[in-house]
Image (cartoon, coloured by chain):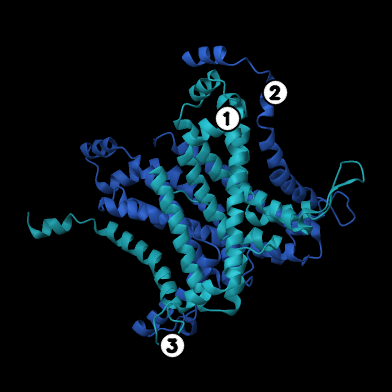
Chain colours: A cyan, B blue
Amino acid sequence: MNILARIRRIPFWSWIWFILGALYFLLPLYATVNFSLRMERDVIGFKAYVRAFEDPDFLKTFMYSNMLALMTILASIILIVPTAYWIRLRLPEARRVVEFITLLPFVVPAIILVFGLIRIYSSPIKIPFTDTTLLQPLTTFEIGTDILIVAGYVVLGLPYMYRSVDTGMRTVDVRTLTEAAQSLGASWFTIIVKVILPNIRAALLSGALLTFAIVVGEVTLASFLGVPAFGPYLFLLGQHRAYEPAALSFASFLLTWLAMGLIQLFTGGQGQASGAH
Amino acid sequence: MAQTALKLKGSPPVSDWKKWLGVTPFFLFAILFLVLPSLRLVMGSFTNSEGQFTFANLLQLFQEQFILDAYWLSIRISAATAIGGGIFGFLLAYSVTVGGLPKPLRSALITFSGVASNFAGVPLAFSFIATLGRTGFVTALIKNVFGINLYQQTEFDLYSFWGLSLTYMYFQFPLMVLIMAPALDGLKREWREAAENLGASTTQYWLRVALPVLLPSILGSMILLFGNAFGAYATAYALTGGRLGIITIQIGAQIRGDVLHNPGLGYAMAMGMVIIMAISLIGYSWLQKRSERWLR
C-alpha cells in the first residue's frame, strides 16, 4: 500500500471534529489551572490552593454541603427504593403516574421550584379550616430550612435516582427474590434492606454519586433558602478574590470527575447527565 | 406462567386499596414538595393583590416589554446553544462511533462528556472568566499571537449573549454526545451495505438513509438541550452577576424582592417558564418515540 492511499484512509474530518472538541473541553480547564497557580508574582505554586483550603469558612460550607448531599441520598433511597420495588412487584398500574412525577423536575427547574417552596413554606403550616398552627414556617428555623432544602434536592435528583433504581431492579428478578425471602419468613423490611438493596447496589451507587454531583456545588436552592452551603460560598468568594475561586473551581471539576469516574467503574456503562445548571 | 403460579402460592392477594398504601409516602412527598409549590405559583398567577381571581397578570405578561425581552433573550440563547451544541455534539459523536477514530478515543470522550455535562454553575462560570475574560488565557493568547484585543477591537464580551452561549455550550454538547452516541450505534451495517449495493454514494447514504432515521433523535435531543439551557440559572448568575436579563435571572430578582411590585405578575412569569419547559418535554418524548421505530 502506498503512502497516498494510507493517508486517504485517515478519517480526516473525524479528527478535525475531535480535536476541536478536545480543545474546547481542555482550554478552560487549562486556563483555570494556569491562573490558579500564579497567585505569587513570577512563581508557579500552590499558594491559592493552600489559601483556599485554609479558610475555615471553606471547610465549614464544604462539610455542610457534603452533609446535605448525604441526607439527600439517604432520603432518596428511603423514598424511592420501596416505591420502585412495590410498583414492580404489586402495583404495575401505578408505573405511568409515578414515572410522570419523576419527569416533572425537568419541567419545573430549580429556580421555579425554590420560588414555590419559599412561597408555601415561609408561612406557618395550619390544620386546614382552623386557626391552629401545626408548625412554624420551615424557613424560619435551621432544621426547618435543612428539611426544605434536602426535600428540594431529592426533587432535583428524582429523575436520575428513580431511573437508576428502576433499571437496577429490572436486571434482578425482584419477584423470585421476594418469594424466596418470604418463604423463609422474612418481613417486608428485611426483604428490602437485606435482599433488595444489596442486589441493586451498583444502581444505587451510581444514583447516589450523581445526586452527590448535583448537590455539592448547587447554588440556586442554597442561595435563595439562605443556607451556608459551598455553592453560595464559592460565588461570594468570587466577588472579592481572584485566585482562590479559580483553585476551588478546578478542585470542583476534579470532584465531579471523581464522581463520574466511580459511576463508570460501578456500572461499566455510560456516563449520565444531570441538570443542575 | 410460572410467575403467576408462584404469586398465587407465595402471598395472599392484597386488596386493591391496600396495594396503593405502598406508594403513599412517595405521593405524599411529591405533593408536598413538588405539586403544591407548583400549584401555588399557578394559583398565584390567577390572583390579584386583593386575592380575587383575575386574568390580568397573564395579559400583563405580554404587555411588559422587559418581560418579553427576558423571555426572548432566554429563548434565543437556548435555541442557539441547542442548535450549535446539537450540531457540534452530533459531529463529535459521529467521529468516535461511525467516523473511524480509534476505540480508546471513544471511551475518553464519553467519560469526559459525562463529567462536562455535570460541570456547571459557579465553577464553570469562573473557568470561562479565566479563559475568555478580560485577562483570560485565550484572550491573552489571541492578543499575543494575532495582535487582536478581543475586548477593544471586537464586539466580543463574555458577559453578553455570545459569551453566555459559549459558556453554556460546555454542558450542552457533551449532553448531545451522550445521547447521540448510542443512537449512531443503532445504525445497522446492513443499511449501509444495501445502499452501497444499490449504487448509492456515501453522501446519498447519509442524506437518504442515515439522517432520516436519525432525524427524530437529533431533533428530540436538541429540544432537550433547549430546555436544559432555558432552565439554567446558576451559571448565568455567576457569570454576569445578574446583568444579563434572561428570564431565570428576572425570576430570581422577583424572589429576592418584589421588583415588579406585583407578586401575581411574578407568578405568571414563572408559570410561563413552566409552560415552555412542558412544551419542550412533550416535543422531546414524542420525537423520542418516533426515533425508537428504527433505532434499537
At 56% from the left and 12% from the top, the residue drawn is: B8
Q: Quadrant of the N terminus of chain A?
A: bottom left
* Viewer-closest of B160 and B209: B160
Q: Which mark is residue B278?
A: none
Residue annotated with mark 3: A41
Residue annotated with mark 2: B18
Residue annotated with mark 1: A190
Please name the amino acid that badge 3 sits on: Arg
Q: From what the image shows, is residue B131 above or below residue A68? A: below
Quarter of the image for residue B261 reads bottom right
Quarter of the image for residue B36 reads top right
Q: Are marks 3 and 1 in contact (CB under 8 Å)?
A: no
Q: Quadrant of the C terminus of chain A?
A: bottom right
At 20% from the left and 56% from the top, the residue drawn is: A10
Cα–Cα gap, marks 3 and 1: 62 Å
Secondary element at image label 1 = helix
